[in-house]
Image (tube, rainbow, N blue to C red):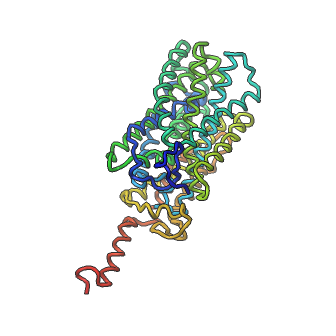
Amino acid sequence: MTIDHSQHGSLVEQHGVDTIPEGERTSSPRDIVSILIGSNLAFGVVVFGWLPVSFGLSFWASTAALVVGTLLGIVLVAPLALISLRTATNLSTSSGAHFGVRGRLIGSLVGLLLSLGYTALALWVGGDVVVGALDRLLGLSPHGLVYVATYAVLAALSATAAVFGYRLLLKMEKLLMWSMSALLLLGLFAYLPHFNGSAHGHYLLGGFWATWLLAVVSAGLSGPIAFITLLGDYTRYVSPARHRTARVYWANAAGMFFGMLIPQVFGTFTAVATGAGNDYVGGLIAGAPVWFLVPLLINGLLGSAGNTGLMLYSMGLDLDAILPRATRLQATYVVAAVATVLVFAGHFVWNAQDAVTSFVLVLTAIGTPWAVITLAGFRRCRGEYDRESLQVLNRRSRGGIYWFRAGWNVPATVAWAVGSAIGLAAVDTPVYQGPLLHWTGGIDVSFVLACAVAWALYTVLSPRRESPIVEEARSIADQAELAGVLPGSR
């Protein structure tokens, strides 16, 4: 567990998942927008726009799936940002109010897996773009050692940004928001001559609607879902005393909407224009005019570093929450190394389309039940949290109003476990098909079922009650009155 030394002028953020002091909560809703847009203008996000096209959908059908999925995801995810606005710590730690101070490890694990997968994907795709651009520009033979060196450089850049922490990342994302937007806009002119919006291929699932729904979940919905544990990393630095809750909410919603759709629609546009098929990066590089190779190279390097730097920062916080004895810096170095290993596996072992699709569908199935339960708990407690009790596990102690049963809120944990199991049983990925698909007509509705089951079980197993803070205050008042302390006692 780390403590703050920022008053000593350290350039490296010293906070882990401890409570951010009010005096340091100086970020604004505009900063949140900059982070969410700037960090996503990278090929690790662009590639999700290619997925619907690789499923056989046209540009317009793919774009519609991206918009619908993104909006659905924002409805679920954006309110989560308000929790850390109240608790001044990250979301997985904040979830201890609803899952228990030990049960919040579920959120840390979900967040770690989500960020790890998306970090590996961003390094993987960004590195392939860099190598492909260098090959066409310099005739650099794209053999194994070149890929290994490129991935290592990207991982080092990303880890450096993550280690320095929030303030450096905020400055970086502000710069990337404008520079990478300009590069993507330039790309529209580069690929426009070969664009045909009505063209489509063979539908992956045999029919239009089944394939379109797959795109809604795997490409559209997955974008906001990637942020279910990340939003609190930024809003914990925003003060509710200075900024209205509504402004913070809409900043997160707008940031996710534009941050997801700008790069993803670019991915859809370029995939259609280049006939990318099952090899997006190969088609992107081959179809690029020579003058656009340098912008591709820049985005592959800087855009990927900005995207993965923020993901590694979040992973460092999640691992710090799981291992309180570790510092955020130590945790960040560990997750950077693990992500790099996954990148190598992604390039040399896995099929790109199958790996990406399977990853996002499985993580969506286990992540959304956690988000639903956390939001239900937030609504029940009306945003009232005991910040000291949330930090019990981080301080390696016991007790507090969120201790529940040995640190676990059993109803919430059971609801999440069952909801996740149902979601996994209904998922349809290229490498695994759940047994419930027979009952859903072969259509993947794992997201809907997982959310519905988790919410229903949490509601039934954990009847509505007042906030633990209110309950504790009432209990103290009752005890004081019985002891004759308050007026009116006998």
**Residue at the image point whose x is 35% and y is 80% from the top:** 479
- Quarter of the figure that contains the C terminus: bottom left
Residue 456 appearing in the image: yes
**Residue at the image point whose x is 45% and y is 37% from the top:** 256
- Quarter of the figure that contains the N terminus: bottom right
- Above or below residue 116? Residue 265 is above
Q: Position of residue 320 (x, y in %)?
A: 58, 53
The number of numbered badges drawn on the structure is 0
Quarter where residue 326 is shown = bottom right
Q: Position of residue 307 (x, y in %)?
A: 55, 35
Q: Position of residue 126 (x, y in %)?
A: 62, 30
Instruction: Locate residue 449 relative to residue 478 in the image: left or right.
Output: right
Instruction: Locate residue 112 relative to residue 478 in the image: left or right.
Output: right
- Residue at the far front: name it: 8
Residue 68 appearing in the image: no
- Along the viewing direction, whichever of 194 and 250 lies nearer the viewer: 250
**Residue at the image point whose x is 46% and y is 49% from the top:** 7
Q: Position of residue 309 (x, y in %)?
A: 57, 38
- Residue at the far left: name it: 488
- Above or below residue 135? Residue 225 is below
